[in-house]
Amino acid sequence: MAPPSPVTQGTPRKAALAAWIGSALEYYDFFIYGTAAALVFNKVFFPASSPATGTLLALATFGVGYLARPVGAFVLGHVGDRLGRKKVLVFTLLLMGATTFLVGCLPSYASIGVMAPILLVVLRLLQGLSAAGEQAGANSMSMEHAPGHRRGYYTSFTLSGTQAGQILATAVFLPIAALPQEQLLTWGWRIPFWCSAVVVVVGFVIRRKLDETPVFEQNRGEVAKLPVAVLFRTHWRDVLRVIAAATIASVSTIFTVYALSYAVNTVGLERGPMLWVGILANIAALLAIPLLAGLSDRIGRKPVFIAGCLACAVLIFPYLWSISDGSYALIFTFGIVMFGVAYSAVNGVWPSFYGEMFSAKVRLSGMAIGTQIGFAIAGFAPSVVAAIGSGKDDWLGVAIFTAAVCLLSATAALTARETHKIPTEDLGVVEPVPARATAVPHAG
């Protein structure tokens, strides 16, 4: 009897759905923090500072979560490559839900003084640990269940879920942001964080029923004691390449955190319309991500990824200028095109593009460490650009910084080899696998 196919009917869809829902729930938690940091944390946790300094400190607490990501990547990458993808996915969801709920329970600076921002930073660090293993685990799970010719499409559902989480997080804040200032700063901002209790229950039920990937099960008896050591011995160039490419996430953090804070706190635009820019851009991304990922299955990962980087480098200029000008029509137009379409070319492709650089034995570690170090750099981008200038006319320096990061990411991608046609079992092989030749009997 022939052995069963490693990819069974329905498994790719089941894995993609689990990745989508889990990532949506996980990143709902992560993004409500960014929205709160941009809108209220400067007043709740740093009221003793000047408005500009309070905003800078609030944005820095957002970045702190990214500091924990590289640490979490090493730990959770090791667990995922040693014990399985499923264990990582369940753990990250539970940790993210619990810490986010506790953020909503924190007393303000007015109640307990300096301990309030200290506790906020501790919980943000734990959020970062959770997020470090989430995307790498979900991407590995969906990619290893997918048919070889559609890895880009199926793996992109992790990032579609991330965008859905961002839509939900921003939508929840719409009625909250409309509250009177006193109610917003006392109890209103806490409601989205308390809703994470639902995240824990729903996400746990979904992910605990998902099967481990066939690739991991096939290699269970050959798992290295220290996958990270194997990773840096055989794939160190790919890790560096992913780190550089992953800094493109600065586009996301600048769009979702800095631009929102700049529009509301510096230019004086209304909170509601600026939140709607994020919602509509992410709705566009929900459609664009699977389409562009599917395109990469046909023409390659590199052309789609690099085109997205270059488009973001160009579009960041008119987007930030339109905010400084206060033109809502242009803000919506450039925001949706840049983040909803151009950045989706990157988001749709990187899960398969990065994952295909590594073998199954070190894939989760490689993706987690590479992306999370790059994302850690991106996490502090809002703080860096806020330090570049806090005035209404300082948008040009921010745009130049963002464009430079986009060019760095495009260059890193250019140095990678194209992998969309490589069979799944041959991915991550350090030396090309020679073609199997038919044995010819010796004539003598």
Image (tube, rainbow, N blue to C red):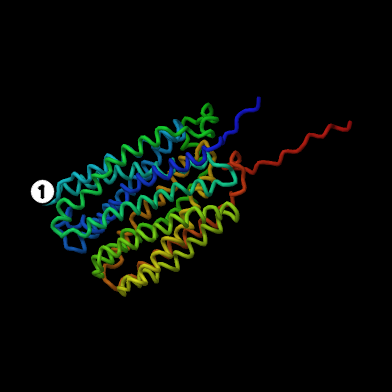
Q: Write down the residue under mark 1.
A: 111
Name which residue type carries label 1: Ser
Q: Position of residue 154 (x, y in %)?
A: 51, 46
Q: Residue furthest left?
A: 111
Q: Residue furthest top?
A: 1
Q: Position of residue 203 (x, y in %)?
A: 35, 39
Of 228 and 186, nearer the camera is: 186
Left or right: 235 with respect to 276? right
Disc count in the image? 1
Of 261 and 129, nearer the camera is: 261
Left or right: 133 with respect to 141? left
Does 110 appear above or below 329? above
Mark 1 Cα-neighbour bin, 10 Å: few <14, some 14–19, many ≥20? few
Which residue is painted at 53% across and 33% down in the image?
214
Q: Quadrant of the C terminus?
A: top right
Q: Position of residue 212 (x, y in %)?
A: 47, 32
